Amino acid sequence: MNKPALLSLFCSPVLLVSLASAADPEPAKAQEKPKTPETTKMTKDELRSKLTPMQYKVACEGSTEPPFRNAYWDNHEPGIYVDVISGEPLFSSTTKFDSGTGWPSFTQSLKKEAIVEKKDDTYGMVRTEVRSAKGDAHLGHVFNDGPKEAGGLRYCINSASLRFIPVAKLKEAGYPEYLPLFEKEGEKEAAKASPESKDAKK
């Protein structure tokens, strides 16, 4: 599907007007330690103090950030994406792909139980909203027009609802259990580039 078609699917004219607000291109700090479930009990004032204005508007009020003018839409660095409120791991760069929409897109979440799906009939459309289970942050929406070879889903997510943890910082940030995920990915890439694999294709 080309870029205009995908953008029209996600954005109605009303939505595009709402995206005219300033972007929040600065990623959240990766050095922060993951938050506990108690984070979900934070008051609105505490959340406003913790988050940037754009993060609060998107994660807590359900807004949508501007496409192509956000922190992670074009991020290709290996690592994981966690809930900006609770620190719960949500997505991995291993399932991230370029959807052409201007928002970070993934074919699946890291853990099914980390995502909550809800019917969204705003703006004259019926869509499936995705929220974080622990932080109850509005993340974005999931569509069934993703890569067929990867299951056919496209999680279209707002950067403002995410915090990116690069592989090099996973242990330091408290997420060492996800290191093997990237070791396996590295092995796959090495196998593809090996002379043996090239010979096998001849």
Image (tube, grey):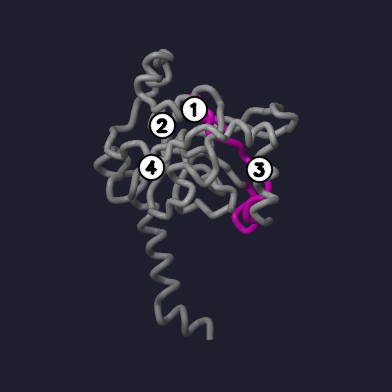
Q: Residues within 10 Å of mark 1 (few under 14, many from 20)?
A: many
Describe residue 176's horizontal placement relative to residue 91 as left or right.
Answer: left
Of callouts 4 and 1, which one flags the residue occurring earlier in the amino acid sequence? Answer: 1
Which image quadrant: the N terminus? bottom right
Q: CA distance from mark 2 to mark 4?
A: 9 Å
Quadrant of residue 88 within the rendered picture: top left
Q: Nearer the viewer, residue 65 or 200?
A: 65
Instruction: Answer whether residue 143 is magenta in the image.
Output: yes
Specify the label residue 164 is tagged with: 4
Q: CA distance from mark 2 to mark 3?
A: 22 Å
* Location of residue 200 with respect to 144 vertically, above or below: below
Q: Nearer the viewer, residue 163 or 34?
A: 163
* Location of residue 59 with respect to 170 vertically, above or below: above
Residue under the image location 28 percent in, 46 percent down: 169
Q: Which residues are magenta?
A: 130-153
Residue extending furthest toward the right? 124
Of callouts 3 and 1, which one flags the residue occurring earlier in the amino acid sequence? Answer: 1
Q: CA distance from mark 1 to mark 2?
A: 8 Å
Q: Amino acid at mark 4?
A: Phe
Residue under the image location 39 percent in, 70 percent down: 190
Residue corresponding to mark 3: 143
Q: Nearer the viewer, mark 3 or mark 1?
A: 1
Question: Where is residue 201 shown, x and y percent of the image?
Answer: 53, 82
Question: Where is residue 18 shown, x and y percent of the image?
Answer: 60, 31
Question: Where is residue 172 shown, x and y percent of the image?
Answer: 24, 41
Contact (Cβ within 8 Å) of mark 3 with mark 1: no
Q: Secondary structure at mark 4?
A: strand
Instruction: Answer whether residue 177 is magenta in the image.
Output: no
Residue corresponding to mark 1: 59
Describe residue 120's horizontal placement relative to residue 109 as left or right.
Answer: right
Residue corresponding to mark 2: 84
Of callouts 1 and 2, which one flags the residue occurring earlier in the amino acid sequence? Answer: 1
